Amino acid sequence: MTMTQQHDDAFLADWAVHSRFGAVPGTNGVDRQAATAADGEQRAWFAQLLEQHGFTVERDAAGNQFGLLELVPGAPYVLTGSHLDSQPTAGRFDGAFGVMASAHACFRVADELRTDPSAARCNLAVVNWFNEEGSRFKPSMMGSSVFTGKMPLETALATTDPNGVTVAAALDALGERGDGGVFGGDTGREVASYAEIHVQQGRSMEEDGVTIGLVNATWAAHKFEFTVTGAQAHSGSTLMSDRRDALLGAARLVVAARELVDEFAPGALHTACGELNVYPNSPVVVASQVQLLLDLRSPSADVIRAAHASLQRTIERVQREDRVEITVTAEHSWDQNPYPESGVELAREVADELGLAHDRVMTVAGHDSTNMKDSVPTVMLFVPSVAGISHSLDEFTEEADLVAGVNHLTGVVRRLAAGALLD
Ligand SMILES: [Zn+2]
C-alpha cells in the first residue's frame, strides 16, 4: 500500500466515525446545532483525535476549539479549519468536511516536519469554529466574528436560543467555554495564515468538471430580521375590514422577496425567507406578530442596494394597505469582497502540481474565512457538491472529491508551514 493510500484510508476511517454524531435516523444527514448535546459529543471525540496525533486542545472564551502543535518555538501558526455544527436536519458534509480535512492535512504535514524540522517556519493549528450556522444562536459565523474582533465577546455569550438559553450557559453545560484567548493578547501565539476547505453548496463545479474551486471572492449579503405587528383578533367573527393581520403582511414580504429577483438580470440576485415565527399561531386567531428572516445575496453591492431600496418601497405599501407595522429588529451584512490573489495563486500551483482540475469560483454563502481573510493571508477552497444540494439531508459529495480535497489542502498547509504568504 502506498503512503497516499494509507493517508486516504486514515481520513476515510475518521470521516466515517465523525458522521455518527447527531445522525438523523434513516438518513445520511445530521442534526448537530451549535452547543447541543450532539455537538458536545462530537467536540469531545474530535479533541481525542487531535490529542492522539500529538496536538494540544484548547478552547477560547467564545467556544472555538483549537488543536495546537508547536514545532518551532515562538513562531506564528498556520491555522486551518471550518465548523462542525450543522443546520437542523442537514447534510454531513458542509463545514464538517473542512474540519476533518484540516485535521488530516495537519497530521500529514506534522509527520513530515517532525521528520525534517528544517522545512518548518510556522506551527500548526486546527480550528473548529463555534456556531458558524447561526441556526440555534443568531447570527451566523459567531465564533470567527468574535475571534476577528467583529463581534464583542459579551454580545456572543449573551445571545439566547428560542428557549432563552444563552451561548455562555450552553457552552458551560458542555465544558466547552475557555477562560480567555488561545491566540493574540498575552498568549504569545499569533496566526500567520488561514486555510479553509468547504463543499461548494452550488452546482457549477460539478457541471464544469472542476475538482478544486479556488475561491476568489464572496457574494455580498444583507440579512434582515423583520417584525410585522398587527392586532390579535378572532379569525371568524372579526370584520375583514377591521383586521390588522400580521401574517398577511409577512406573507406579502415572502412573495415580494421572490418577485424582487425578477427586477434584475438572471442570476444577479438570490433572495429567501428562511424562518417565520408567528404569534400566537393558533387556529382561531388573527396573528398579532410575525418575525421573519429575509436574505438578499448578490455578487454586486449595487444590486443589493437597489434590491434593498425596492424592498423598502414594498414595506411602505404593505404597512399602508394592510395596516400593519414593519420594523427591522436585526441586520447582518457583508460586501462583495475579494480573497487575496496570492492565496488563489498558491492554491492554483498546488492543484497543478497534483494534476487536479481547478477553476476560480465565487462563494455565494458566507464562511468563517470571510471573517479571517480580513485579518490574515487566507486561502479558501471548494470541492464539488452533487447537484448543489446544501443545508439538506440530501447533501452529498463523492468520496473521490473528498480525498482530492484533503490532498490539495495538505499541499496548501505544507507551503504555508514553510512560510508561503508570510512575506
Ligand atoms: Zn458551512
Image (tube, grey):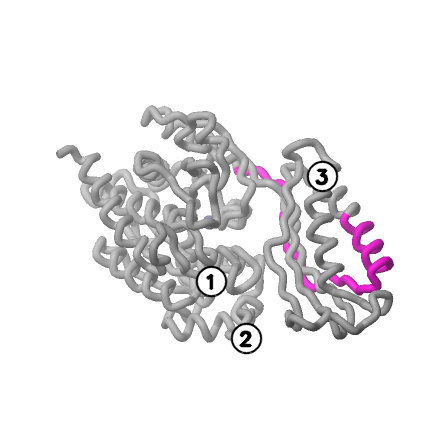
Eyeballing the image, is 320 above or below 411?
below
Q: Which residue is mark 3?
A: 303
Q: Amino acid at mark 3?
A: Val
Q: Which residue is mark 2?
A: 164
Taking 300 as reference, is 97 left or right? left
Label 1, label 3: how many angstroms apart (C-alpha)? Answer: 40 Å
Residue 261: percent from the left, percent from the top? Answer: 69, 40
Q: Secondary structure at mark 2?
A: loop
Magenta residues, start to end: 311-339
Q: Amino acid at mark 2?
A: Gly
Which residue occupies 84% across, 54% down?
317
Does residue 212 appear anywhere in the picture?
Answer: yes
Please state which of residues 388 and 248 is positioned toward the viewer in this rendering.
Answer: 248
Residue 151 figure quarter: bottom right
Label 3, label 2: how many angstroms apart (C-alpha)? Answer: 36 Å
Q: Residues within 10 Å of mark 3 (few under 14, many from 20)?
A: some
Residue 279: percent from the left, percent from the top? Answer: 66, 71
Eyeballing the image, is 156 above or below 122?
below
Q: Secondary structure at mark 3?
A: helix
Which residue occupies 74% across, 54% down?
252
411 magenta-colored: no
Question: Depth-wise, is mark 1 or mark 3 nearer the camera?
Answer: 3
